[in-house]
Amino acid sequence: MADQLLRDVSSYLRGATNDDGNVSSRSIMAAETNEITDLRRSDRRQDRREIRFEACTYELFDTRGCEALTHECGEAYTLNQSREGIMLLMDHAPRTRQYLEVHIEGSMGRHEINVCEVAWTKPLPIESDDDYYMVGCHRVMEPCRYLQF
């Protein structure tokens, strides 16, 4: 994804967030449907979000009974993270309740794996040749951090 896309997303998020990093309660125009979606405070988590623009890779899983099947692998960007979840920028819209394994590569060999369940997907209302989506994910367990040598 291009640097301009990240600047556009950053600008959009600054307009849609409060000083504490939470999405504001103003209405956001959904790009594809032209519906107004009201984001009420009671519908959102209250924990602090840390804005982090980082490249990451992911594996998207579908489940059949007790079996997990890898559906797709790809690249995305983290937009923000909290203790309970992570918001991603993706070039497609995963279904609600699908599982993602998100791999974030940090500096100096530090890595992090997050196992998440997709909670919501919203089209990103920015001008671009491709469609992009904000994907809200709820962590299924604490992140696994490790060093790679």
Image (cartoon, rainbow, N blue to C red):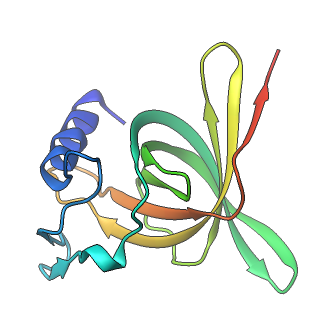
Residue 128 visible in the snapshot: no
Q: Which residue does the image show at 23% across and 75% down from the upper left?
A: 39
Furthest-bottom residue in view?
A: 65
The image quarter in which residue 25 lies: bottom left
Q: Which residue does the image show at 43% across and 57% down from the upper left?
A: 47
Residue 48 visible in the snapshot: yes
- Residue 67 lies, with reference to residue 20, above or below; the image says below
**Looking at the image, how many numbered discs can be counted on the residues?**
0
The image quarter in which residue 24 lies: bottom left
- Residue 43 lies, with reference to residue 127, above or below; the image says below
- Horizontal side of 105 relative to 141 (left or right) equals left
Q: Which residue does the image show at 17% across and 44% down from the upper left?
A: 14
- Horizontal side of 135 relative to 56 (left or right) equals left
The image quarter in which residue 60 lies: bottom right
Query: Residue 103 at what x, y percent from top left?
Result: 65, 41
Q: Which residue does the image show at 55% across and 59% down from the upper left?
A: 84
Query: Residue 15 at what x, y percent from top left?
Result: 12, 49
Furthest-right residue in view?
A: 66
- Quadrant position of the N terminus in the picture: top left
- Residue 104 lies, with reference to residue 13, above or below; the image says above
- Quadrant position of the C terminus in the picture: top right
Query: Residue 72 at what x, y percent from top left?
Result: 64, 59
Which sits in the foreground, 3 or 47?
47
